[in-house]
Amino acid sequence: MNVTAAEVSGIQRQAWFDVAAAVYAGVAALLVVNTLPALVNVLAHGLAWNDRALGVFAAADVAGITLGSLVGIPLVQRRSLMSTTLGGVIALVVADIGCGLGGGEFQVNAFRFAGGLASGVILAACYALYSYGNAQRNFASFCLGQMASGLIGVTALPHLAARWGWASSFVFLAAATALAIPLAWWLPRHSAQRNPVAVNTVGAAKTAASVWVAVAGIVVYVIGAGAVWTFMGRMGLASGLSEQDVNFAISGCEVAGILGAAATLFPSRHLGTFIPLTVCALLSAASVWAMRSSNPTIFFWALAVFTFTWLAFATLQFAVIAAADSRGIATISMSTAWYLGFTVGPYLGGSLVEHYGFVPVQIFGAGGVLLALLTLFPLRSRATTTLGVKQ
């Protein structure tokens, strides 16, 4: 579907309810991921699943998201963003209900994989929507919503399961997701489009490769960050810290993540984008190396800085790539890149820790963010033009 330049200009001046609907849909797509620490405990107690079964459940969801976001790329180019999101939300609600019906490990995991596919399609549409207007603010709102939903979910699910059984957790997730159905009617009734004046046609082909290199940088970054995220608690325990100190630090880093997303809600014309990006990358690398400290205070701040910079860096990274992407395909592909990296990271981290200890995980964590930063610098001039801020 083709749109005129005037229509595209209207698309980019999104009303607040368009953004709110897209943010809620994106958050709903990741409810299972963001409540996973509590959800696996609910399944362990309610269905007596062992660690292997719980790992398969988590892997089924993340693998489904990765594949679904890849399938979503051509869908959002051919179908309206509203219909794509609406179809994905309905399918996700059905999958959540299917998980709650039980019927054995195979059935639950099959529905979870189907739910992951639906979530990936929703994210493909939402990533396209976040790139319209103020991409940095839109994506920061999405990150804030994720952190908030995670805090609410991990608190609510154990209480629901204790009172009404394990299946009530999936009923809760289905009901929360279903709220996105009426909101989806506010979403645009056109396919994913990019502003033809955001980049000149001479530079579009020239910079396409650099945009895809930056998307590859997301994969490398999230592989390293995902490995660190999975094993940072183990690092603290291996350094001689008490379980209480480690749990306190992990709780604190959740709050730090909210602050990291909030810090990028309002772009600074004075600082631009690349100064905060560079600072975040350097602080993130330093925090990863500080995680092996046996001092509980240093460990706490290392985790807090790591999570703060992860959310802040990811938001700025999204804004830069979206600004430089003339066709919009790379922007939609960022959701695939994210969950591909997050699928590989924990598995790679586990293998490295088993054979070589925690140092290789720290190398991947610190090196990944620095490499991702380097992949963004070729986009600097295009981000300056499109974002309209000092770089």
Image: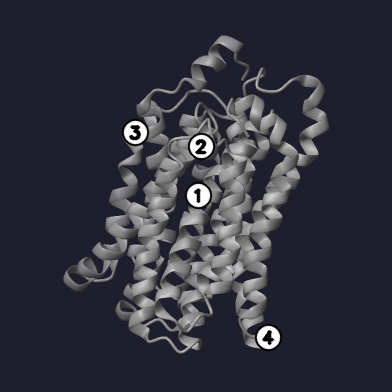
Q: Nearer the viewer, residue 354 or 363?
A: 363
User: Does any portion of residue 222 appear in the rendered image?
Assistant: yes
Give 172 or 127, whichever is nearer the viewer. 127
Q: Is residue 234 above or below residue 37?
A: below
Which residue corresponds to the image point at 75% horizontal and 46% vertical from the top-left? 213
Comes first in the chain, label 1 or label 3: 3
Name the residue carrying label 3.
183
Mark 4 Cα shell of 10 Å, populated few (<14), some (14-19), many (≥20): few
Give the percent coordinates (x, y) of residue 90: 40, 43
Identify the disc placed on residue 356. Answer: 4
From the image, state whether disc 3 or disc 4 is nearer to you.
4
Determine the CA span between mark 3 and mark 4: 49 Å
Q: Secondary structure at mark 1?
A: helix
Q: Percent x, y for residue 159? A: 20, 68
Q: Secondary structure at mark 4?
A: helix
The amino acid type of the residue labelled 3 equals: Leu
Q: Residue at x 75, y 40 (%)?
A: 378
Image location of residue 294, percent across then percent down: 47, 84
- Graded by Cα atoms within 10 Å as few (under 14), some (14 to 19) or many (20 or more), the crowding at tag 2 reads many
